[in-house]
C-alpha cells in the first residue's frame, strides 16, 4: 500500500500542535522546579532559625554553613552566605507554609528577594505576591509597583459602584480604580489645561496603560459622538477586557466640581445607547481631577444613576522659566564631578 505524503497544511497543523504541547510541558516543568526550589529555600531558612533559637547560635553560623554546603554541592548555585541570610529572612517573613504554598512559592526566588528588601508589612507583602502571580509581573515590574505605592492606591477611588453595579461587577470595578493616579512620566506646569494633559497621556500611551492596570484597551482620544445633531467628544475612551465594558475618562485640570458628575452621566448614557454591545456590562466613568474634597465628591455621587468614580492625579511639575537659568546644566554638573575626581588623592 502506497504511503501518503501529508499536505503542507495538515503537517503544519501537526507540528504546531506538538510544539504547543512541548512548550506547555516545559512551562509546567519550570514552574514545578521553581516551586520546589522556593520551598527548599524556605525549609533551609526555617531550620536555620530553629537551630539558632534552640542552640543559641549567632550570625557566624551562616558563613560557616555556606562554606560547607558549597563544598558538598559545588554545582549548586544559591548557597552563598548572602542567600542563606535571605532564606532565614524568608522563613521569618512567611511562618505559615499554607500561605507560602498558595501565593509565595509560585513566584521566582528573585521576586521573593525583592519583596523582602522593599516591603516590611506582612499584609502588604502578601498583597504584592498575589498581584504578581495574578498579573504575571516581571521582577522589575514588581519593584516599579512597590515604589509607586500601588498597594496604598489600588481600589481607593471614591465611587458609587456598590449602588449602581451588580455584584461581583461592583467589587471588581472598585478594585480596578486607583487614587491618586501617578503620571510622573509627564512634566506639566501647574496651570496646564486638560488638552495638554490628554496629549501627554496619549503620547505616552504605553506608560499610561501601565498605570491604569491590566485589561485596559485604548479605543481613542477626543472620541466623537453625534447626539441630536450636535457633536460631543469624550476625552479618553477605553474598553476593559475583564469587566467587559467601556470606560470613559474625563480629565479636569483643577479641583473637582459637582457638575462634572452630570456631564459624565450624560456621556455614559450616550455610550451605553450608541456603543455598548448587548452582551457588554454597563459603561463606567472615571473623572480625573488635580484635587478633590471627599465630602463634595460623596454628595455629588449620591444622586447619580450611572457607575462612576472620582480620583486625583499627580505629575511632575515643570520648572518656571524664570528659575531655569539659575540652575546648572547637565554639562556643568558633569564637569564639576570630573574636577572633583581629579582632585582626589
Image: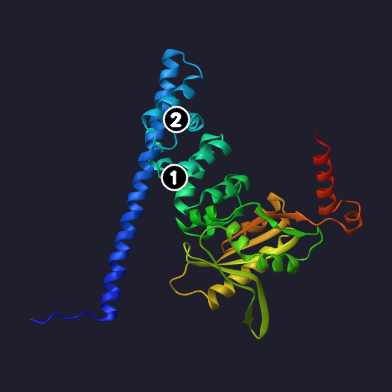
- In front here: 310 or 91? 91
Question: How far apart are the alpha carbons under marks 1 and 2?
Answer: 15 Å
Coordinates of residue 43 in the picture (x, y in percent): 38, 30
Q: Residue at x 66, y 86 (%)?
A: 229
Image vertical order of residue 6 relative to residue 78, above or below: below
- In front here: 74 or 65? 74
Where residue 252 sits, quadrant-wise, is: bottom right
Q: Mark 2 highlights which residue? A: 91
Where residue 102 sits, quadrant-wise, is: top left
Left or right of residue 41: residue 19: left
* Pointers 1 and 2 in contact (C-beta within 8 Å): no
Any part of residue 80 in sight: yes
Q: Mark 1 highlights which residue? A: 107
Quarter holding the N terminus is: bottom left
Any part of residue 282 in sight: no
Q: Residue at x 14, y 79 (%)?
A: 3
Amino acid at each position: 500500500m502506497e504511503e501518503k505524503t501529508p499536505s503542507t497544511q495538515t503537517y503544519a497543523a501537526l507540528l504546531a500542535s506538538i510544539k504547543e504541547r512541548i512548550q506547555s510541558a516545559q512551562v509546567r516543568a519550570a514552574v514545578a522546579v521553581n516551586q520546589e526550589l522556593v520551598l527548599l529555600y524556605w525549609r533551609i531558612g526555617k531550620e536555620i532559625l530553629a537551630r539558632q533559637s534552640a542552640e543559641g547560635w549567632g550570625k557566624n553560623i551562616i558563613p560557616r554553613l555556606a562554606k560547607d554546603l558549597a563544598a558538598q554541592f559545588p554545582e549548586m548555585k544559591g548557597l552563598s552566605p548572602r542567600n542563606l541570610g535571605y532564606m532565614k529572612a524568608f522563613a521569618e517573613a512567611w511562618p505559615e507554609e499554607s500561605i507560602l504554598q498558595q501565593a509565595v512559592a509560585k513566584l521566582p526566588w528573585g521576586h521573593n528577594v525583592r519583596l523582602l528588601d522593599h516591603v516590611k508589612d506582612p499584609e502588604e507583602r502578601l498583597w504584592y505576591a498575589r498581584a504578581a502571580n495574578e498579573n504575571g509581573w516581571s521582577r522589575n515590574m514588581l519593584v516599579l509597583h512597590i515604589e509607586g505605592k500601588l498597594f496604598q492606591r489600588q481600589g481607593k477611588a471614591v465611587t458609587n459602584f456598590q449602588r449602581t453595579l451588580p455584584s461581583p461587577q461592583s467589587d471588581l470595578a472598585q478594585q480596578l480604580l486607583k487614587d491618586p493616579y501617578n503620571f510622573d512620566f509627564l512634566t506639566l506646569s501647574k496651570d496646564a489645561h486638560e488638552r495638554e494633559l490628554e496629549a501627554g497621556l496619549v503620547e505616552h500611551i504605553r506608560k499610561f496603560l501601565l498605570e491604569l492596570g491590566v485589561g485596559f484597551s485604548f479605543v481613542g482620544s477626543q472620541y466623537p459622538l453625534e447626539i441630536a445633531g450636535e457633536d460631543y467628544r469624550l476625552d479618553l475612551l477605553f474598553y476593559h477586557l475583564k469587566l467587559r465594558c467601556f470606560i470613559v475618562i474625563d480629565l479636569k485640570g483643577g479641583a473637582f466640581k459637582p457638575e462634572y458628575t452630570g456631564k459624565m452621566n450624560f456621556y455614559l448614557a450616550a455610550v451605553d445607547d450608541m456603543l455598548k454591545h448587548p452582551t457588554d456590562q454597563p459603561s463606567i466613568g472615571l473623572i480625573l481631577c488635580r484635587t478633590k474634597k471627599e465630602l463634595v465628591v460623596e454628595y455629588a455621587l449620591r444622586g447619580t444613576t450611572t457607575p462612576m468614580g472620582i480620583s486625583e492625579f499627580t505629575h511632575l511639575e515643570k520648572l518656571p522659566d524664570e528659575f531655569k537659568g539659575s540652575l546648572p546644566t547637565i554639562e556643568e554638573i558633569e564637569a564639576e564631578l570630573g574636577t572633583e575626581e581629579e582632585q582626589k588623592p
